[in-house]
Amino acid sequence: MVPDGLGFMLQDRGQMYTLEEGQNNTYAPHKRPFHTIIPAFVTKDGKPWMSFGVMGGSFQPLGHTEILMNMIDYGMNAQEAGDAPRIDHQGSSEPTGEKRDGVGMVYLESGYSFETIRGLMSLGHKVGFQIPGSYGGYQAIRFDAREKVYHGASESRKDGQAAGW
């Protein structure tokens, strides 16, 4: 369904919202309820820098953060940031208000060193390993203002490619 003249399509993923006051995911002015459709648009110095998204349900906020950290903190390009091993966290309370006992489990994709794994465990984290494919799916377009070119990136864990002309 597309509202006439508004330029966007309605979707049915709002099922996680509530209109009940006082709940974490109440839909209300000045709130940003948790949701899993979260494409991102990043600016740098007030100018467009990158549009991207990481699919994967509840993994999405963490996946988005990992991509940005890889690029900003570690200097990776858009493709390297998506190819780098990922971390997931499951099993603790949910942003929608669902409570769980404990702190959950930190899942590591292959590619982390034994020293990193041991370091996490020594800090008290429960560490596990998930099957490939459970760490989201990534796509990005980044604009290089100095060179005046666009760079595309596509998830190496799934089918896809970045192409341009």
Image (cartoon, rainbow, N blue to C red):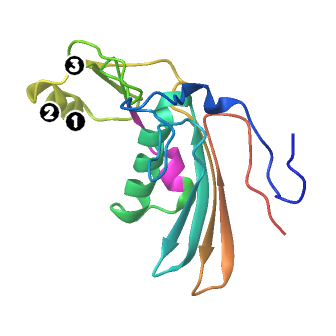
Q: Quadrant of residue 127?
A: top left
Q: Residues within 10 Å of mark 3 (few under 14, many from 20)?
A: some
Looking at the rendered image, the quarter that the C terminus falls into is: bottom right
**Category of crowding for the residue at label 1, using alpha-carbon neighbours closer than 10 angstroms: few (below 14), some (14–19), many (at least 20):** few
Q: Which residue is denoted by mark 3 in the rendering?
A: 126
- Image coordinates for residue 39, horizontal then vertical, percent: 60, 50
Residue that carries the numbered disc 1 in the rendered image: 116
In the image, residue 91 sits, relative to residue 42, either above or below, namely above
Helix, strand or loop at mark 3: loop
Say whether residue 85 is visible.
Answer: no
Q: Amino acid at mark 2?
A: Gly
Where's the N terminus, which quadrant? top right
The residue lying at 48 percent from left, 53 percent from top is 81
The answer to which of marks 3 and 1 sits earlier in the sequence is: 1
**64 sits to left or right of 99:** right
- Of residues 96 and 116, which is closer to you in this image? 96
Q: Which mark is residue 119?
A: 2
Q: Amino acid at mark 3?
A: Lys
Is label 2 in contact with label 1 (beta carbons under 8 Å)?
yes
Q: Secondary structure at mark 2?
A: helix
